[in-house]
Amino acid sequence: MCGIVGIVGNSPVAPLIVDALKRLEYRGYDSAGIATIEHGRLDRRRAEGKLVNLERRLKDEPLDGMIGIGHTRWATHGVPNESNAHPHFSDGVAIVHNGIIENFAELRDELMRDGYSFTSQTDTEVVAHLVARELAKGLKPVEAAHKALKRLEGAFALAIMFKGDEDLIVGARNGPPLAVGHGDGQMFLGSDAIALAPFTNSITYLEDGDWAVVRRNQVDIFDMGGNKVDRKRQQSLSTSFMVDKGNRRHFMEKEIHEQPEVISHTLAHYVDFVGGVSKPLDLPFDFAKIDRLAISACGTAYLAGLISKYWFERYARLPVDIDVASEFRYREMPLSKNDAA
Ligand code: GLU
């Protein structure tokens, strides 16, 4: 879930981006970063852990650009450390990304064959190189971004910035939410209206498959075919105390659409997507040495337990008992030394 912020502003944007990222902290993250462009120079600060670490970095080495993008990362591809933290760079292109690029392995191989080298383990870096490759072929930034976006599969929200244009951020959405905030002589991008609440309450939510060309005085939104689309501008009532349901009709619909991203984040704890192998589990018992598993859970976790019973019995041939936790305590289930509960 994590967060994205972009500002094409008229004063140094790094402190504003940090402020907006703080409003997205509720979504969870493990590292954070910001990039700005100042006098044609693209620069970034990144830090593992809480935003306060990034703030410390910025205090020691400030960024003064008036255009910038920021990110709180919740790792799916690659460990949470500074070199995997966003923004990612490639030849004058800076990118922040929420979600997953499902075809990243295929794209990475293609880009490596073309001579691009990778400095992170993330799926995101392929997007930076794809855009840079189109620029190197002579395309203008907006066309390069569009061409690269068309290659992507998966669930993503992206903000892309270009060293050669200090009045442009390209935003794209296919799954995770992304909103444009309309200011007066400045424009904003954010994962939700809450992030943008201190700057503007005039918001346009991108729809899945949309991408936006965001400049200080103009925003144009397109579909993947490159056709201009009209998206409603609305007054947001969000304050920093509210959870935003974006352009979904109700919270249940929002949560349904969040499932691919949430499941990817959960799986990322157990699967190394980059190496294509499962990660060692840190459990207080050895699955190979137990004869039976007892699961006790409530509500949705109980339902998840029922599914795991099915899988454990079918694939691991391990018998499983599952109980509603409120009943389990009265049942006094006999447990032997080779049972795990
Ligand atoms: N998949 C990307 C990564 O692991 C983005 C994760 C996110 O949504 O923050 O860096």
Image (cartoon, rainbow, N blue to C red):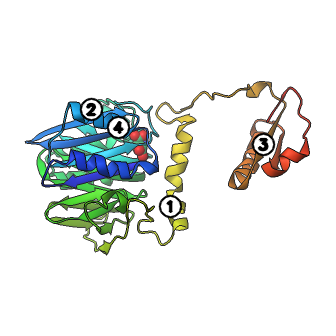
Query: Which label is found at residue 295?
Result: 3
Q: In which quarter of the image is the C terminus?
A: top right
| Residue 79 against residue 196 in the figure, above or below | above
Write down the residue under mark 2: 57
Quarter for ligand 1?
top left
Q: Which of marks 2 and 1 is nearer the N terminus?
A: 2
Answer whether residue 100 is visible to the viewer in this image: no
Quadrant of the rendered image containing residue 45 = top left
Type of residue at label 1? His
Write down the residue under mark 1: 257
| Residue 186 against residue 326 in the figure, above or below | below
Q: How far apart are marks 1 and 3 (CA)?
A: 29 Å
Residue 52 relative to residue 252: left or right:
left
146 or 173, which lies in front? 173
Type of residue at label 3? Ile
Q: How crowded is mark 4: few (under 14 residues within 10 Å), some or many (20 or more)?
A: some
Q: Mark 1, mark 3: which one is toward the viewer?
A: 3
Answer whether residue 242 is visible to the viewer in this image: yes
Q: What element carries label 2?
A: helix
Quadrant of the rendered image containing residue 295 = top right
Type of residue at label 2? Arg
| Residue 234 against residue 321 in the figure, above or below | below
What is the x, y in percent for residue 208? 39, 63
